[in-house]
Image: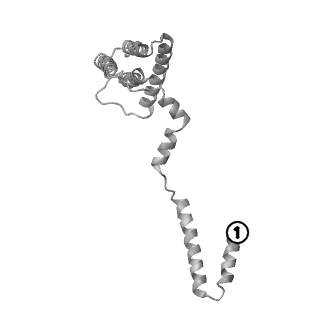
Amino acid sequence: MKFKLQETSLFRNMAGHKPSIDAIESAHDKIIMQKFYERKNPKINVKKKIREVRQSRVVQAVITRFQTPSTKILIKTSIAFVILGVLTVLFPTEEGPTLQVALSLIATMYFIHERLKSKLRAFLYGAAAFIFSWLLGTFLMVAVIPPIPILKGLRSFEVTTSLITYLLLWVSSTYVK
């Protein structure tokens, strides 16, 4: 409504000037087309969106639960989970990598306890990390990741799921604080 009033007053002021009326109409059309184009093709500021996501409460809560470990912890956890991964690939059993998966749970709880010095928190974090990583590994195998051609046989699904689980357990046992 306000825009129409301003437009009408401009027309009255420029009543006898044909070039002025054409210029006003041209500017009006240009503004309308620019607004239409902006709505049709919005520019997304990726840096701003990333900053907003990083500053959200949920992301901040997750980030504060992780810390960069010392080199000693990084090496110890890496060696343990690489050995479990190699054992799983080299010796897949008829039942699947049950023993290696159990050892990965124990290793996760051990490494978390070593840093946090709390048996209850180590148990809770280890169990939660194990459940989350196993479910995520299974989901990724079923929905996202194609079968790995190196791992063939009856137990390739379980072996690949276990390898994904080991990777996620390594992250939780190394970086969770």
Left or right, residue 177 beside residue 78? right
Q: How is the image coloured?
A: one colour
Query: Residue 7, percent across and down?
Result: 66, 75
* Quarter that holds the C terminus: top left
Position in image of residue 86 (x %, y %):
29, 19
What residue do we see at 66% from left, 79% from top? Answer: 10
User: Residue sitting at 51 percent across and 34 percent down?
Assistant: 59
Q: Is residue 171 left or right of residue 24?
A: left
* Quadrant of the drawing holding the N terminus: bottom right
Picture layout, residue 161 above or below residue 52: above
Dot 1: what SS? Answer: helix
Q: Residue at x 55, y 68 (%)?
A: 33
* Residue wearing tag 1: 2
Looking at the image, residue 99 lies above or below residue 56:
above
- Mark 1 crowd level (few <14, some 14–19, many ≥20, 10 Å Cα): few
Name of the residue lying farthest toward the top: 119
Residue 67 visible from this viewpoint: yes
What is the quadrant of residue 162 in the picture? Answer: top left
User: Which amino acid type corresponds to the residue marked 1 in the rendered image?
Assistant: Lys
When asked about the image quadrant of residue 29, the answer is bottom right
Specify whether residue 95 is in view: no
Q: Where residue 146 sits: x, y (%)?
A: 37, 34
Query: Residue 107's x, y, as percent?
Result: 38, 14
* 124 in relation to 22, above or below: above
